[in-house]
Image (cartoon, rainbow, N blue to C red):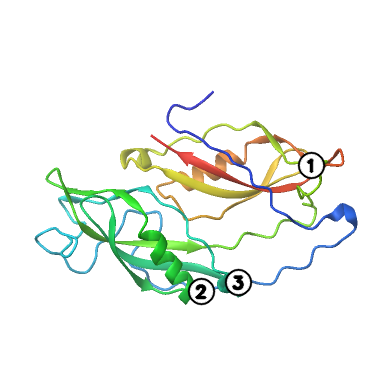
Amino acid sequence: MRDRNAALSVRPVVLAVALAWSGSAAPASAPTQEKPADQTPGQQGAAPQTSPASGEKSSAQNPLDVTKGVSPPIAIFRPEPQYTEEARRAKVQGTVALWIVVSADGKVSDARVARSLEPSLDRQALTTVKTWEFKPAMRDGVPVAVRVSVEVTFRLAFRPPDNVVFSAAGKDDIPPQPISAPNPEYTQQARRAQLQGTVVLELVVNKKGHVTNVTEIGPKLGLGLDGRAMKTVRKWKYHPATSKGEPVGAQIRVRVKFHL
């Protein structure tokens, strides 16, 4: 039964991995590089934090702080950044922290890096956040421009277990098909904040159609919705993927949408 509180969209994308049935062995994965955790202006998934200084008049050139009497902006459109080839080859992972100005119309009018990760990923983060859209901050019932901190996290997709061998390369290869995919529920905190968005997950569907190895690969949505999505997806059931008529494990990607 469809939950009236959350709309769910599932779009599996089968990822090519080593074909175990052909006798080839998957190479060992190289360790990834993780930037050390520095002090950031805000925590991902939490309400945006305020900047050090505030102005009395609100404009894109003189934004306010999110303080008492000023409600924070709420993201309503938050696309994910793409990895650059140089960062992927170097296996760089981590978080870019930024200060952004959200104008009274909900658009991002300025963005600056507060904590760098890697030059090409910094540029990707800047480019992406400038496309984000928000329900604007409010003061006395009037939309105002504010400066807030945000984080953009880059995570490389995990390497699937060696027994995950599915690749939709042949005409006899069939990806896993969902047979039970219950919708996640909103958290009270996310509902009060009217938070909407998408959680992107990678998972493995084993030969029995059970979900394992659930990993979040996109930016966190926050306010408990990421955990709700992962907990719910672990309960999903599938007809397993098949290759040449035999059930096989498969790694897929799903998108869980939260919409009020």
Query: Residue at position x 88%, y 52% from top?
Result: 21
Residue 43 visible from this viewpoint: no
**Mark 3 crowdedness (10 Å alpha carbons): few <14, some 14-19, many ≥20:** some
| Disc number placed over residue 35 in the picture, else none | 2
What separation in Å lies between label 3 and label 2 (alpha carbons)? Answer: 11 Å
> Could you tell which of marks 2 and 1 lies nearer the N-terminus?
2
> Could you tell which of marks 3 and 1 lies nearer the N-terminus?
3
Quadrant where the image shows the C terminus: top left
For badge 2, the amino acid type reads Lys
| Disc number placed over residue 91 in the picture, else none | 3
**Mark 2 crowdedness (10 Å alpha carbons): few <14, some 14-19, many ≥20:** some
Residue 103 or residue 248, whichever sits in front: 103
Image position, residue 137 (x, y; %): 22, 50
SS type, badge 3: loop
Give the vertical position of 52 relative to 106 (above or below): below
SS type, badge 1: loop
Query: Residue at position x 15%, y 59% from top?
Result: 59
SS type, badge 2: loop
Quadrant where the image shows the N terminus: top right
Residue indicated by mark 1:
207
